[in-house]
Image: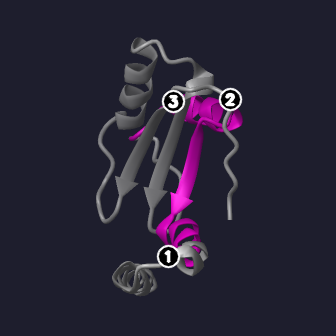
Amino acid sequence: MHKYYFHSIDVFEFIIENKLLAGDQKFQLNRYYNFAKKKNYTNSQIIIFYLTIDGISPSDYSIDKVLMNNLSKKKILFNLSYKTSIKNWLVDLLPVIKANNVRFQIEQYISTIGKF
């Protein structure tokens, strides 16, 4: 499981690209990153999560390879997986969820993720 440590800055630009059974669009992550930079966010304020079933990296079609390597090294771009990252996070949350109906929904979601 990944642990994400953020700087002590009050404002962040979180970008979550959710690729659940969907293909990449041409340079979409480049556009998202450039959009955040145009909004005057610094690299220490930008976090990009690329969320897929298996945690695979974005394709060259989705992001320029040089930019991807740069963002990964600077801990701006993270690859997350439904099968591990999200599932483990939800499992870790179960003990603190007090509402039975919410716990039931989370358990169902965990079960669905397990079917991928």
Question: Quick one: label 1 or label 2, which is nearer the N terminus?
Answer: 2
* Mark 1 and mark 2 residues within 8 Å of each other at the beta carbon: no
Q: Quadrant of residue 76?
A: top right
Three-letter amino acid code of the residue under disc 1: Ile
Mark 2 crowdedness (10 Å alpha carbons): few <14, some 14-19, many ≥20: few
Q: Is residue 70 magenta?
A: yes
Three-letter amino acid code of the residue under disc 3: Phe
Question: As drawn, is 87 to the left or to the right of 36?
Answer: right
**Residue stretch rendered in magenta on the structure:** 62-91
Three-letter amino acid code of the residue under disc 2: Ser
- The structure residue drawn at horizontal position 43% and vertical position 85%, both measured from the top left corner, is 107
Point out which mark residue 97 bears.
1
Q: Mark 2 — residue?
A: 8
Question: Quick one: label 1 or label 3, which is nearer the N terminus?
Answer: 3
- The structure residue drawn at horizontal position 33% and vertical position 48%, both measured from the top left corner, is 24
Mark 3 crowdedness (10 Å alpha carbons): few <14, some 14-19, many ≥20: some
- The structure residue drawn at horizontal position 70% and vertical position 54%, both measured from the top left corner, is 3
Point out which mark residue 12 bears.
3
- Residue 103: x percent and y percent? 42, 82
Q: Nearer the viewer, residue 27 or 31?
A: 31
Secondary element type, mark 3: loop
Q: Nearer the viewer, residue 74 or 13?
A: 13
- Residue 75: x percent and y percent? 67, 37
- Residue 86: x percent and y percent? 51, 67
> Is residue 57 shown to the viewer in this render?
yes
- The structure residue drawn at horizontal position 70% and vertical position 43%, both measured from the top left corner, is 5
